Image (cartoon, helix red, strand yellow):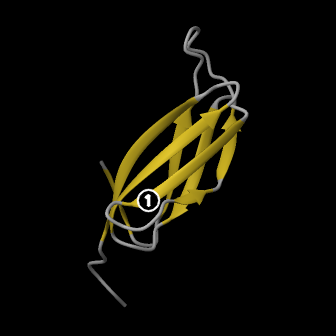
Amino acid sequence: MNSYDIGDAVVLRVEFRDGRTKGLVDPNTVTCFVKQVGGGAAVEAPTTRESLGVYTATVDLTATGTFSYRFQGTGGATGSEEGRFRVRPRRVTG
């Protein structure tokens, strides 16, 4: 699990591939949801198409803890990918 600091902007990345050819493909829609483990509801993070089949979501980190995320693609290339990351507390304040 990757670890980051409060104030970082983490870039989450996903690739969508054709199940038969394994080539990159674009879904009709891509969404990314991020949720703090043990926290409230998941929030949608804006996604960006970087290239064919490759999407990112940038999340500004403002709280400590463990977070889960899920990319979901629908239409054309249906699929999902999940992951987790941790945000460390500050050691130095000022």
Quarter of the image with the C terminus is bottom left
Front-most of 89 and 39?
Answer: 39
Image x and y of residue 33, in percent: 53, 53
Element at label 1 = strand
Horizontally, is 55 left or right of 62 in the view?
right
57 with respect to 94 (left or right): right
Residue drawn at point x = 66 percent, y = 23 percent: 25
Q: Residue at x 53, y 42 (%)?
A: 71
In this rendering, is residue 21 above or below 9?
A: above
- Which residue occupies the extreme left position in the image? 91
Callout count: 1
Q: In the visual, does 88 lie left or right of 75?
A: left
Q: Residues within 10 Å of mark 1 (few under 14, many from 20)?
A: some
Under mark 1, the amino acid is: Lys
Determine whether 94 is above or below 44 in the image.
below
Q: Hey, which residue is sitting farthest bottom in the picture? A: 94
What's the residue at 46%, 68% (across, down)?
A: 61
Q: Quadrant of residue 3?
A: bottom left
**Depth check: 25 or 89 in front?**
25
The location of residue 42, given as percent across then percent down, is 49, 60
In the image, residue 45 lies at what x, y percent?
59, 57
Q: Quadrant of residue 83?
A: top left
Where residue 22 sits, quadrant-wise, is top right
**From this viewpoint, which residue is outermost toward the right?**
28
- The answer to which of 5 and 77 lies nearer the viewer is 77
Rendered view: 18 above or below 40: above
Q: Residue placed farthest to the top in the image?
A: 20
The residue labelled by disc 1 is 35
Residue located at (64% from left, 49% from top): 47
Q: Position of residue 4 (x, y in %)?
A: 37, 61
